[in-house]
Image (spheres, rainbow, N blue to C red):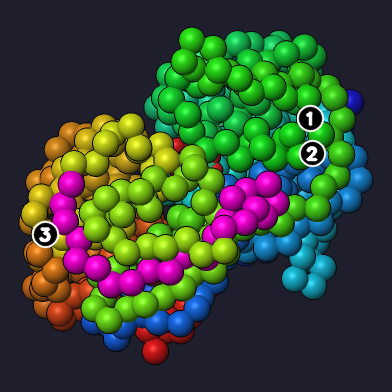
Amino acid sequence: MGTCRAGFNSARALPEAIATVKAPHASQPFDTRDRVTSFRFQPSRPLTGHIRVPGDKSISHRSLMFGALALGRSRISGLLEGEDVLATAAALRAMGATIERDGDDWLVDGVGVGGLLQPSAALDMGNSGTSTRLLMGLVASHAITAVFTGDASLSRRPMNRVIDPISLMGARFEPSPGGTLPLLLEGIEPAVPVTYRLPVASAQVKSAVLLAGLNTPGVTTVIEPVPTRDHTERMLRGFGARIEVGKEDGERVIRVHGRSDLKPCDVIVPGDPSSAAFFVVAALLVPGSDLVIENVGLNPTRAGLIEVLRAMGGNIKELDQREVGGEPVADLRVRHSVLTGISVDPALAPSMIDEFPVLFVAAAMAEGRTVTSGLEELRVKESDRLAAMAAALTGAGAQIEEREDGLVIDGTGGAPLRGSANSRTKTHLDHRIAMAMAVAGLASSNGVEVDDTAPIATSFPNFMTLIEEACT
Ligand code: S3P
């Protein structure tokens, strides 16, 4: 098991510790302020042909983390090479794992469960909530003190949801006011196993506790009243962890037995359904479109958008359904469709939590009214996505009512959106606002200006190239 090599004096105050660990970086790759690029997305020709979206972000993060904890070498194919995932890779390297590209694949030489080392500088999480929350869990049960920093968007996001359960396991935190980054975490070894019932439906919180449990003696239990994406459970099983998933009194219960070795794995990462979502909606909205998106992950805990779009009348077919890397996958054939507004069941929210920005765009061009509710979580994503999308779509000419927990949208009935020529989408460092409004632009009559496309690189580095490919 790991030992604390060098390190911070835990008695030191947070600002001093941060100043110490902020060793000069060669570059600040995640600071988007100096590479703001605005872009006007113009009305598009039909989307046609075959495209492939990059690897799933959630699975990519986890494949690196579990590879880093396994004893031996894991090979990852189809890893998403977005900034968020690269932030995870950099942090794991800083704690002792060896991670390098090998042709189109990535190789990870792990340090073994409990083998992470003290990082010598702050862990820069960029824009990535998933990197931050899952790595907080990993670090918590090691004798490591780490400082987590992030960009302006990430530094506003709530971390108490992870701090609370992880503190129960014995780790100590010094967050910035409001439970935010920058944050100092002093891990503990051995940590105390807990049984934790999730107060918010969050796969990140669930995963943080389970990952802390990997190096904790005994059994760590997470109770999930509302199921969320289950990649952590599926993949931990693949890496040989002792993990049990069951249902008790209608709730999902996940138990991980700590301190058992992980074995290295060959992981194949399927295409990200959250990235495919932008092309699915663009093809539904732009007349004449007939597009095949290959190799899309369709894990039922992620596929809510497809269900909702079909209920709105979307013509989406799953071709060649298969299993890739333990996940259901298919090619999606999407044809232009006239959509009808619906009331979206709030119970579907966790299975499409990242897809609401682009669903709002689809609703803005549907016939009739779409009502969404139960979406308070959207206010604490990379931006406040309810406020950001209400403002952006209103600027693009849509009829939107913003409520505390959702948007009510009166659609155009299939007519293209027509905003005022000088309105400009504010993306607030949020990749999904930028991409959703790019789709709105493709389906508009006079284009949509997005103020900053740089954040797109966090999850979908070749988005602009694929748009060109699909639209020509
Ligand atoms: C993710 C979980 C979701 C999602 C995020 C990725 C994950 O966040 O929004 O993009 O990989 O576990 P929450 O756990 O906050 O719902």
Amino acid marked by disc 1: Ala
Amino acid marked by disc 3: Glu
**Tag 2 residue:** 239
Q: Which residues are magenta?
A: 321-342
Q: Is disc 2 placed on a helix, strand or loop?
A: loop
- Residue 15 in picture, x, y percent from top left: 55, 34
Label 3 Cα neighbours within 10 Å, binned few <14 / some 14-19 / many ≥20? some
Amino acid marked by disc 2: Phe
- Residue 261 in picture, x, y percent from top left: 87, 30
| Residue at the image position 75 percent from the left and 71 percent from the top | 104
**Tag 3 residue:** 367
Q: Alpha carbon of mark 1 to alpha carbon of mark 3: how far?
A: 49 Å
Quadrant of the snapshot with the N terminus? top right
In the picture as drawn, the residue positioned furthest to the bottom comes out as 472
| Residue at the image position 28 percent from the left and 72 percent from the top | 336
Res 158 → quadrant: top left
Name above or below for residue 420 compared with residue 248: below
Name above or below for residue 291 compared with residue 276: below
Q: Is disc 1 placed on a helix, strand or loop?
A: loop
Instruction: Note whether residue 17 is visible.
Output: no
Name above or below for residue 347 compared with residue 461: above
Quadrant of the snapshot with the C terminus? bottom left
| Residue at the image position 21 percent from the left and 47 percent from the top | 387
